[in-house]
Image: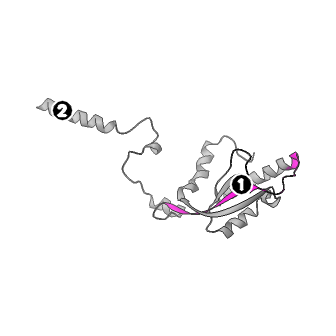
């Protein structure tokens, strides 16, 4: 009987341990059933009860001024990227990036602002918008408040800066 109880206990112990995949990073394990809610982080990020908040998404589109020579285009792109970095460092831009291909929609911004008027003020600082090589369409968007952590995480995985 003791052997049977021991065998059952060992079987249960090993079956419990086998449910945790030790080869998967903790962030990728979805079989853990607790909610590690962090009220301080939620407050810092302005999260609602669902961990979400309002942002303004900007679709960057090809502008009417596509006649810049190569040197001016390169200079404008550097200024555009420097502006992106500045807005991200200020915490106003949580995500930005180009789309692949040469389609009409060139890229996106996700602004950490309350409304479209605030986003418009930020867009006015973009040299590519000022030069007419890009135009913008704005939409209010509801997404994870955790997006605000992307820029800090990105700094830890990027070997080079985008505006270098």
The disc at residue 75 is none
Looking at the image, residue 130 sits to the left or right of residue 145; the answer is right
Q: Which residue is mark 1?
A: 84
Give how far across and how far down residue 124 sits, in percent. 76, 64
The disc at residue 6 is 2
The magenta stretch spans which residues? 51-72
* Residue 70 is a magenta residue: yes
Quarter the N terminus occupies = top left
Q: Earlier in the sequence, mark 2 or mark 1?
A: 2
* Residue 69 is a magenta residue: yes
How many callouts does the rendering have? 2
Q: Decide which of 30, 136 is in the foreground and name it.
A: 136
Residue at the far top in the pictured view: 3
User: Is residue 121 in view from this perspective?
Assistant: yes
Quarter the C terminus occupies = top right
Give how far across and how far down residue 161 sits, in percent. 70, 45
Q: Residue at x 32, y 37 (%)?
A: 17
Give how far across and how far down residue 153 sits, in percent. 58, 48
Residue at the far left in the pictured view: 1
Label 2, secondary structure: give it: helix
Looking at the image, residue 72 sits to the left or right of residue 2; the answer is right
């Amino acid at each position: 009987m003791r052997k049977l109880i021991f065998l059952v206990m060992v079987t249960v112990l090993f079956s419990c341990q086998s449910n945790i995949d030790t080869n998967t990073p903790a962030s990728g394990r979805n079989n853990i059933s607790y909610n590690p809610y962090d009220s301080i982080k939620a407050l810092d990020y302005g999260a609602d009860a669902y961990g979400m908040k309002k942002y303004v998404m900007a679709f960057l589109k090809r502008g009417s001024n596509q006649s810049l020579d190569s040197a001016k285009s390169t200079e404008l792109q550097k200024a555009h990227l420097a502006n992106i970095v500045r807005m991200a460092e200020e915490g106003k831009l949580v995500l930005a990036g180009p789309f692949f291909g040469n389609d009409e929609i060139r890229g996106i911004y996700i602004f950490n602002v309350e409304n479209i008027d605030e986003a418009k003020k930020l867009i006015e600082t973009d040299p590519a918008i000022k030069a007419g090589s890009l135009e913008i369409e704005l939409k209010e968007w509801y997404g994870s408040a955790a997006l605000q952590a992307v820029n800090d995480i990105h700094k830890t995985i990027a070997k080079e800066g985008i505006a270098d």
